[in-house]
Amino acid sequence: AATHLALLRKTELDVLMGAGRFTLLDQSAAAELFPLCLSRGVAVELASPFNSGILATGPDDPATRFDYQRPTEQTQTKVRAIQTICASHDVTLKRAALHYSALPQAVTRLVLGLISAEGLRSNLDDLAAPPPSALWSDLAELGIPTPIGET
């Protein structure tokens, strides 16, 4: 997010693509980057809402990655806590991750990497079913902020 912020301060853009910087595990784009994009009318396309896969497959899949690396035990523990809260609302981790990344007003598009048509159908089904708003307040107890004024 810092690189994008520095670029945006030096040039005019219509669209900015960020990857993995507003997710259930990383909200670094929220404080400064998104407000600057909104004030300048810059559309944000947000890629990698699953942080390289961990928010789609969960923390215990041996092939899972967080920011393209094997997740630390601390990251895995946090994802397990997020999963527990999601399950208490009958929401999958993947579905929550997709909707969370789409919450900020600055985000105009999610960019999702796909391997199969089944993955596309799964993502579309998840996006068609918004989680209950109580999920976001429960996740806030883990330190995962809901964008101000957005539910």
Image: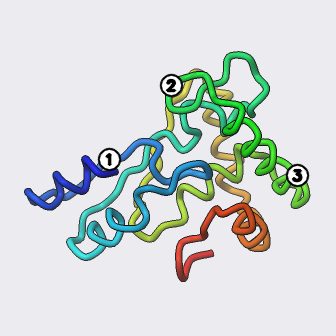
Residue sitting at 14 percent across and 61 percent down?
A: 9
Do tag 3 and tag 2 residues touch (Cβ < 8 Å)? no
Q: Earlier in the sequence, mark 1 or mark 2?
A: 1
Image quarter of residue 145: bottom right
Q: Secondary structure at mark 2?
A: loop
- In screen coordinates, is 123 left or right of 113? right
Residue sitting at 80 percent across and 49 percent down?
A: 81
Instruction: Name the mark nearer the viewer: 1 or 2.
Output: 2
Q: Secondary structure at mark 3?
A: helix
Image quarter of residue 32: bottom left
How far across and down, in percent of the image, does residue 42 sit? 25, 64
Do tag 1 and tag 2 residues touch (Cβ < 8 Å)? no
How far across and down, in percent of the image, does residue 98 sit? 61, 50
Q: Quadrant of the C terminus?
A: bottom right
Pointer 2 residue: 68
Image quarter of residue 129: bottom right
- Residue 17 circle label: 1
Task: Please name the amino acid that badge 1 sits on.
Answer: Met
- Residue 87 circle label: 3
Disc 3 crowd rating (10 Å Cα; few below 14, some 14-19, many 20+) is few
Disc 1 crowd rating (10 Å Cα; few below 14, some 14-19, many 20+) is some
Task: Please name the amino acid that badge 3 sits on.
Answer: Ala
Task: Please name the amino acid that badge 2 sits on.
Answer: Tyr
Q: Front-most of 105 and 65?
A: 65
125 up-or-down from 62: above or below? below
